[in-house]
Image: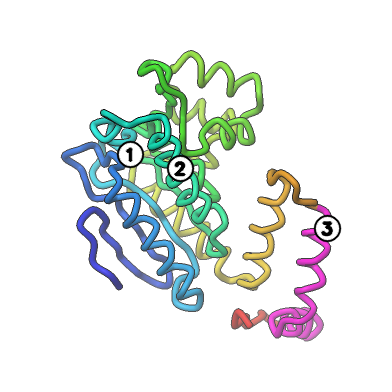
């Protein structure tokens, strides 16, 4: 694995934990960190048989990611600000479209770009002390990394308007009630255990089918993409895989399937 300045990676039992390692900066997302995140997820995509799940978290107890590095906003022209946002959106889309399931372990503050990063992951497990928020309007801004879109998908239009326009923070339990978090656990250790439990369960399933589930669910939200057709195409594609043949044989023979991702 690559070594990074702003990330720490640990691969254990086919689960890769990616830790944003800027604790003194509340794990804020500067451009260097964003590029390292892109590189780390390219590594995930390139090693599907070695990595069956990803946990993304922040170093320490105070913050998952407390936001973007605001110091990098100073002096941006409108043109450069648009490119800045588009680059961040592309990186988060790579996470969202990754065929390996990704769980955000949200410890502490997930604000601004941090909340957007958590939402780009397929699922979120939060520590009970976690705080979610999109406070950009306090700076005369709006989210730029896809937050307006994913938040609306996850919690609905009316709640998204309130969340985005009030800039209020919400706690982990309310986030779970609203659909922003899948689970809330007492502390970071328990949240990590829950994330491992979920990914271990998923990793026992057919990995090519898991990737197709991700494609089909994401297609629902893509402009100009017919989700039902994406589903039908993916369903048909499963029939050409060895995993499908193994799954059917195992079912008929009343044994556990041994999927190879082929």
| Label placed on residue 127 | none
- Is most of the magenta stretch helix, strand or loop? helix
Q: Position of residue 232 (x, y in %)?
A: 83, 63
Q: Nearer the viewer, residue 19 or 13?
A: 19
Near mark 1 (Cα within 10 A), the count class, few <14, some 14-19 or many ≥20, is many
Question: Is residue 128 among what the camera can see?
Answer: no
| Label placed on residue 118 | 2
Contact (Cβ within 8 Å) of mark 1 with mark 2: yes
Q: Say what secondary structure mark 1 lies in.
A: strand
Q: Say what secondary structure mark 2 lies in.
A: helix
Give the residue pinned by disc 1. 65
* The residue positioned farthest toward the top in the image shown: 166
Q: Of the residues tagged 3 and 2, which is closer to the observer?
A: 3
Task: Name the image quarter holding residue 117.
Answer: top left
Residue drawn at (42%, 62%), measured in percent from left and top? 41
Above-or-below relation of 193 to 248 = above
Mark 1 or mark 2: name the one nearer the start of the chain. 1
Give the distance between the C-alpha atoms of the residues marked 1 and 3, in whole angstroms.
37 Å
Q: Position of residue 156 (x, y in %)?
A: 65, 27
Q: Nearer the viewer, residue 163 or 11?
A: 163
Give the distance between the C-alpha atoms of the residues marked 1 and 2, in whole angstroms.
9 Å
Residue drawn at (35%, 49%), measured in percent from left and top? 57
Give the distance between the C-alpha atoms of the residues marked 3 and 2, in whole angstroms.
28 Å
Task: Name the image quarter holding residue 1.
Answer: bottom left
Mark 3 or mark 2: name the one nearer the start of the chain. 2
The magenta-colored residue range is: 228-254
Give the residue pinned by disc 3. 229
> Looking at the rendering, in which quadrant would you find the C terminus?
bottom right
Q: Position of residue 39 (x, y in %)?
A: 37, 62
Contact (Cβ within 8 Å) of mark 1 with mark 3: no
């Amino acid at each position: 694995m690559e070594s990074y300045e702003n990330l720490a990676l640990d691969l254990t039992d086919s689960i890769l934990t990616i830790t944003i390692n800027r604790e003194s900066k509340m794990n804020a997302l500067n451009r260097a960190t964003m590029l390292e995140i892109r590189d780390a997820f390219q590594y995930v995509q390139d090693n599907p048989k070695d990595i069956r799940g990803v946990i993304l978290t922040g170093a320490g107890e105070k913050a998952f990611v407390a936001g973007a590095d605001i110091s990098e906003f100073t002096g941006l022209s409108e043109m450069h600000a648009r490119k800045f946002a588009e680059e961040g959106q592309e990186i988060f889309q790579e996470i969202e479209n990754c065929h390996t399931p990704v769980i955000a372990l949200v410890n502490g503050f997930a604000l601004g770009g941090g909340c957007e990063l958590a939402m780009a992951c397929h699922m979120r497990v939060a520590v009970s002390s976690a705080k979610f928020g999109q406070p950009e309007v306090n700076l005369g801004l709006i989210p730029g990394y896809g937050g307006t879109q994913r938040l609306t998908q996850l919690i609905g239009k009316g709640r998204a308007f309130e969340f985005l326009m009030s800039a209020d923070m919400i706690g982990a339990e309310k986030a779970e009630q609203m659909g922003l978090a899948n689970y809330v656990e007492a502390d970071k250790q328990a949240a990590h255990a829950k994330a491992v439990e979920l990914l271990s369960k998923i990793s026992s399933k057919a990995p090519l089918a898991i990737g197709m589930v991700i494609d089909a669910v994401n297609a629902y939200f893509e402009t100009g993409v017919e989700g039902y057709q994406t589903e039908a195409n993916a369903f048909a594609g499963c029939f050409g895989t060895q995993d499908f043949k193994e799954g059917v044989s195992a079912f008929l023979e009343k044994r556990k399937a041994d999927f190879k991702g082929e």
